[in-house]
Image (cartoon, grey):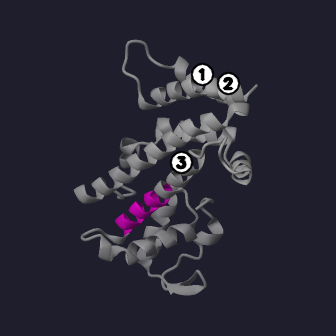
Amino acid sequence: MCHGKSPSERVKLKANAEIPIDGVKVAIDQSVCDETIIISDIFNLSEMDALELVLSGESQKIHFDCLSRGLIAVVCYYDVHRLLALLLRTMLEWDKESAHEGLREFIEQNFVQRTLFQHLLQLQASFNVTSEFHMLSQPHVNGLGGPRHQNLLRGVIEEIRENTAEALYSLCEWGAEHANEFLIDIYPILKGVPLAEKFASHHLSAWICLLKLTSSAVLSQSK
């Protein structure tokens, strides 16, 4: 799920069309088309990725009593990102000094980057249960179900937040060579902390990053 909506893919979504999925042609009806377009729009996914989520929702109905195919597809979307966040956290929690050289080079070349730091930092400010529930509850989306569906989503979203936060802190420990760039990114957040008011969660994340980046362990690596 790495690219967004595509006009060339959207025109393929027609009732009674046969769409190849993993080498197998799957016939879709109008309701599948409609749900696929909604999933594609709200999550900015390619139509084929969105279709796979909807079909996954259909196949998983046996495990989710009383939830519709579309609502299960929403859970599947967040669950994929939960697994990705967990994978990223696990990789960055490898001790830099004890990691095998090949693994260390792979992590440094592919993940120890300012763009990833900025993305993880932004997630702490913009991605939470409240923001996601607000998006899903819009009338044109109707992607938020009853208490059971909300509890499932709340658990997955909170786990994504936890894993991305821990990945962010571990990235600080890996990124001694990028410490100055990382500090530049967190300073505006720290300067924006309102006086005499309660910290927001992303303010706390920025403070933890500051402590990590200015720790003796990181400073000694940059020498």
Region in magenta: 70-81
> Helix, strand or loop at disc 2?
helix
Residue linked to disc 2: 219
Kind of residue sitting beneath label 3: Arg
Q: Is residue 135 visible?
A: no
Identify the residue at horizontal 53%, vertical 56% (top origin): 84
Q: Residues within 10 Å of mark 3 (few under 14, many from 20)?
A: many
Residue closest to the far front: 98
Residue linked to disc 1: 187
Residue linked to disc 3: 89
Q: CA distance from mark 3 to mark 2?
A: 22 Å
Identify the residue at horizontal 44%, vertical 81% (top origin): 29
Give the label, 1 or 2, closer to the camera: 2
Q: Is residue 178 above or below residue 88?
A: above
Kind of residue sitting beneath label 1: Tyr
Identify the residue at horizontal 37%, vertical 45% (top origin): 129
